[in-house]
Image (cartoon, helix red, strand yellow):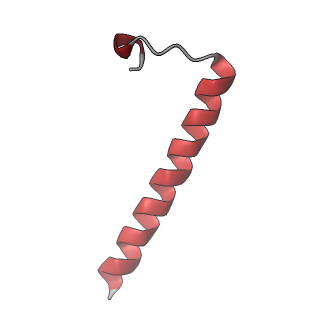
Amino acid sequence: MLRPQQIEVSKEEAAKLLAFLKKLAKITVTKYLESDER
């Protein structure tokens, strides 16, 4: 996904990025579901 923009990341950086994106997605879904309950 980053390669077309010529951005190279190591496996360690990719793992950290993936963990961050998972956390961000979880927060986003939680906030959405909380606002939907109101």
Q: Residue furthest bottom?
A: 38
Q: Is residue 24 above or below residue 21?
A: below
Q: Quadrant of residue 2?
A: top left
Q: Quadrant of residue 18?
A: top right
Question: Total label count?
Answer: 0
Where residue 1 sits: x, y (%)? 38, 20
Residue at the image point whose x is 56% and y is 51% from the top: 23
Quarter holding the C terminus?
bottom left
Q: Residue furthest front?
A: 6
Instruction: Say which of 16 and 36 sits in front.
Output: 16
Where residue 20 sits: x, y (%)? 57, 44
Where residue 26 sits: x, y (%)? 50, 57
Residue at the image point whose x is 40% and y is 78% from the top: 34
Q: Is residue 1 above or below residue 37?
A: above
Left or right of residue 2, residue 11 in this image: right
Q: Is residue 11 above or below residue 27?
A: above
Q: Is residue 38 above or below residue 34?
A: below
Left or right of residue 22, residue 37 in this image: left
Instruction: Say which of 26 and 9 sits in front.
Output: 9
Residue at the image point whose x is 30% and y is 78% from the top: 36
Q: Residue furthest right?
A: 12
